[in-house]
Structure formats: structure tokens, C-alpha cells
Amino acid sequence: MYVDSESELTRLTYFRGRVALYNILKALGVGRGDDVALSAYTCVAVPEALLALEAQPVWVDLKPDGLTMDPDHAESVITSRTRAVIVQHTFGVPADMDRLMALAGRRGIPLIEDCCHTLRSTYKGRVVGSLGTASFYSFEWGKPIVAGMGGSAVTADEGLRQKLSRQNAVLQEPPLVRDLKIEIEYLGYRLIFRPALYWIAKQFKNLLDRFGVIEPSYNSPSRGAPSTDFLFRMAPLSRRRLERVRSDIQRVADHSTLIAGQYRERICTSYVAHPAIDPGSNVVFGRYPLTSRHKEAIMRLARKAMVEVAGWYSSPIHPLTQQQWRSVGYTRGCCPNAERRACEVLTLPTHAKVTQWDVDRTVEFLNCLQL
Ligand SMILES: Cc1ncc(COP(=O)(O)O)c(C=O)c1O
């Protein structure tokens, strides 16, 4: 079921992951004035989908020692006005689904799984994305499966699927110029995106973004004035690629497991801590998260050494600055664990382009750190 059968991923496709989420919420009847709970320590694209529907984000903190939603905090902020809860399996680490599903069940609200960071992690033997009412995925640069740009929605609820299909049928094809921008970005991804060139590729991508040559990764979310992204289905060339690469999912997951296993075994510096993993979960890491009090210093040195160490998420709502948090209804201090994680989490790549040479360099870089 779900992404165990890869054809599910190409059934309901959208311009981006956030557009898939928007459509799931819309099909569930979420609209103006409704509260939707979601975890802090996420990408701004997630609240953007809510604001496009004029719904109100209700921020839930992370577990005190983890990367996923805190069920106790969720319990305290979900009220009778809450119409849905979005649970993110951050970097592939499954959220505490037993407690969150029980909570959603008690409150009679749908639980939507954000599977943008993983396609194959399992929670108590079940693949993530198959536990809630619906799940959504993203296929842009930086995600486990890269098809160019796009997203998909998956659900086992036949009624919901029919609604999603009807909504999907009236979406427009993106204009050619936007397809072209996606192709330019995908070409850049194919040619220069690899761990040793990470910092150069990032700078190059930012430059192309600034000059409008590629699609921006982030929009400025605003209530009731959605970006045109929400009008479109997945760009045709990206969709065709997704059809081709979906059969690679297991291979990509096995590769990620191998790489993450090496990081876990071989990185032994006291400057960083490895992620805690629940014994009931089998984690396929979209990125491998380390925690450190020296995040900024390590990032600076990694940049000099040309080693891929990323800082996302650098904010509880990445990449918004503190001054911008209010635009998505986030008040400073409402999710202290998420704010702390943003200051201390570094992530290492586990994607398909990571080679043994890259792993050796990364391990050596970290184990030889002198701060
Ligand atoms: C956790 C998470 N959810 C959703 C999204 C949105 O995906 P997209 O950029 O395809 O809209 C992202 C994007 O980076 C993400 O990191």
C-alpha cells in the first residue's frame, strides 16, 4: 500500500509538495479561519499552504530531545477549532505516531503525514505515509528522489482520493517558461550537485534564484494571496522523470541506509551527538542529523574544507528570520525546543550522489575538528 506500490506516487501529482498539501487540506474541507496544527522546525512552504487557504497555523513544539512533534504539546494546543494536524517525519525520523494518531482519533481530526524527507522509513513495521489519513511528498533538489520539481499526495481513503482527483483535474499545466526554469535547475542539479561541490552549487543556485533564472525555493507566504504555484499540476518533464525514477526508491533507500550507518559508526568526535532512534523505527534518513553546540563554527570550517554540512533548518520556520516569524503566526518562544534545534542541528547528506570517497572525507573532517 502507499509508497510500497510506487505507482501511488504518480497518481496525484502537483507543481510542488506544498501544492499537494494545499489540495489535501482543501479536499478535507479546511478553509478560512480553521486552525491547523503543525510542527515547528519545518520549511516555510508548509505554513504557506495553510495561509493560501486562509487557515491559521497552530505551532506545535518538538519533543524535548528529538526532531519530531511533541505529543504532549500537541495535546495542549489542539482545540475544538483545529481541523487537521500535519505530522512531519523530519529527516526521515518517524514521529511518535501511536500517540499522535490516538490524539487525532480522540479529537476526530485527520492526521496528514509530511513525508517530504523520506519514502521508506518504517514505524513499528509500517512504512511512514501509510499511517495517517493522507500523506504528501516532494521531488525537488534536496529531497530523496529528485525529479526536477513537484509533489504528490497519497491516501487510502477512496472518498478523499476521488475529491483529490476532481480537484486535480482542474489544475492547469504550468506555463512553458516555468517548466524551462525547472529544467535549468535540474540541469544544474545533474551537472554540479555533489557533496564536494555543495557550497559552490548552493551559491550558484542562489545566484540563479536572485536573477529569476530558476524557480525560487521559497515564496513569501501571505494570507489569502496565494502564489500562482497553487494553480498548477506537476510540470510535464518533471512528471515524466518521476515515472522513470520511482523504481529507484528502494535502491536510493538502501544507499541512504548504508551511508547513514557509516556516519553513525565512524563519527566519534565529542563535538557532535548522534540522533536518538526509537527501537520501533527503521529510519531511512533523508539527511543525517547531528547535534552540536558549535554549529556555526563547524559550518564555517566545512565551507572552507568543501565538505557538505548543511544548516537546515536554520530557523523554526526555515528560512524565515525572527522578524518574519509573525507572518506565519509564529510567536517567539512558543516552541522553545524547535528554536534550540535550529541553533544546534547540522545535517550530512545521504542522497544518491554521496560516494564512499565523500563519506570518508566527511568522517575525517568531523573527527579531526579542533575548535
Ligand atoms: C518538510 C518539508 N515539507 C514540505 C516541503 C515542501 O516541498 P516543496 O518545496 O516541494 O513544496 C519541504 C520543502 O523543502 C519540506 O522540507
Image (spheres, rainbow, N blue to C red):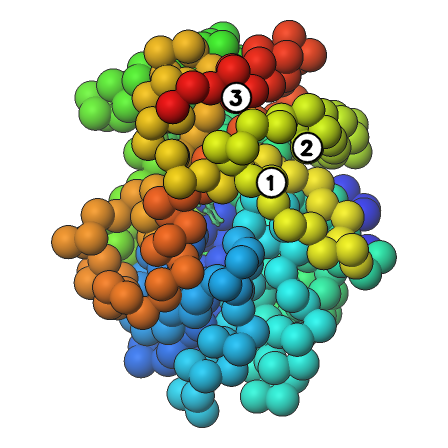
| Image location (x, y in percent) of residue 14 | 51, 46
Residue 227 is at least partly visible in this image: yes
Asked if residue 243 is positioned above or below residue 220 in the image, the reply reads above
Mark 1 and mark 3 lie on one chain; the one further toward the N terminus is 1
Ligand 1 is within 8 Å of the C-beta of the residue at disc 1 = no
CA distance separating discs 1 and 3: 12 Å
What is the CA distance from the residue labelled 2 to the residue labelled 3? 12 Å
Residue 71 image point, x, y percent: 56, 74
Above or below: residue 72 compared with residue 59: below
State which tag comes first along the sequence, 2 or 1.
Answer: 2
Question: How packed is label 2: few (under 14 Cα within 10 Å), some, or many (20 or more)?
Answer: some
Closer-to-camera residue (219/356) = 356
Residue 160, located in which quarter of the rendered image?
A: bottom right
Check contact, mark 2 vs mark 1: CB within 8 A: yes
Residue under label 1, please give it. 274
Q: Which residue is mark 2?
A: 264
Q: Is residue 8 left or right of residue 315?
A: right
Residue found at the far bottom of this picture: 80
Q: Amino acid at mark 1?
A: His
- Mark 3 packing: few (<14 Cα in 10 Å), some, or many (20+)? many
Name the element at disc 3. helix
Q: Secondary structure at mark 1?
A: loop
Q: Is residue 237 visible?
A: no
Look at the image and tell me in which quarter the N terminus lies: bottom right
